[in-house]
Image (spheres, rainbow, N blue to C red):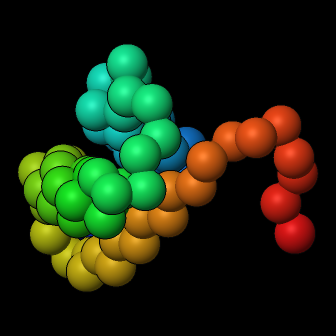
Amino acid sequence: MTHQDKKFDVAAITKLIQGTSHPYLSGKAYDKDEAGQWMNELGQKVTQALKESGHPQFKYIVTVDLGENKGEGTR
């Protein structure tokens, strides 16, 4: 199977993103002053993990949004 034959596996990529983001964010309490730095660092970590996932035929765009959870839903 060549790189061109590989399909984008959404479930595997979701697990990879969760496996990268959960350890990074665990133990952190939301801080608006640090959230910008966290988003940049997490975006870099996820991008690197995606590049190392063995799918060089894909280009990735990673967007990270963090918000404080106050028990309210989002729209």
Q: Is residue 28 above or below residue 44?
A: above
Q: Is residue 8 left or right of residue 62?
A: right
Quarter location, residue 6: bottom left
- Closer to the camera, 58 or 34? 34
- At which x and y percent is residue 54? 16, 53
Q: Quadrant of the C terminus?
A: bottom right
Q: How many marks?
A: 0
Give the quarter of the image for residue 37: bottom left
Q: Nearer the viewer, residue 46 or 72?
A: 72
Q: Is residue 45 left or right of residue 75?
A: left
Q: Nearer the viewer, residue 9 or 5?
A: 9
Residue ID at (25%, 80%): 59
Residue at image position (30%, 75%) is 60
- For residue 53, say whether it is visible: yes
Q: Is residue 56 above or below residue 70?
A: below
Q: Using the rendered image of the protein, determine whether residue 43 is visible from the camera's viewpoint.
A: no
Residue 5 on image: x %, y %: 33, 68
- Residue 53: percent from the left, percent from the top? 20, 49
- Tell me if 62 is positioned left or right of 51 in this view: right
Give the residue at x 50% y 56%. Answer: 66
Q: Is residue 66 left or right of residue 44?
A: right
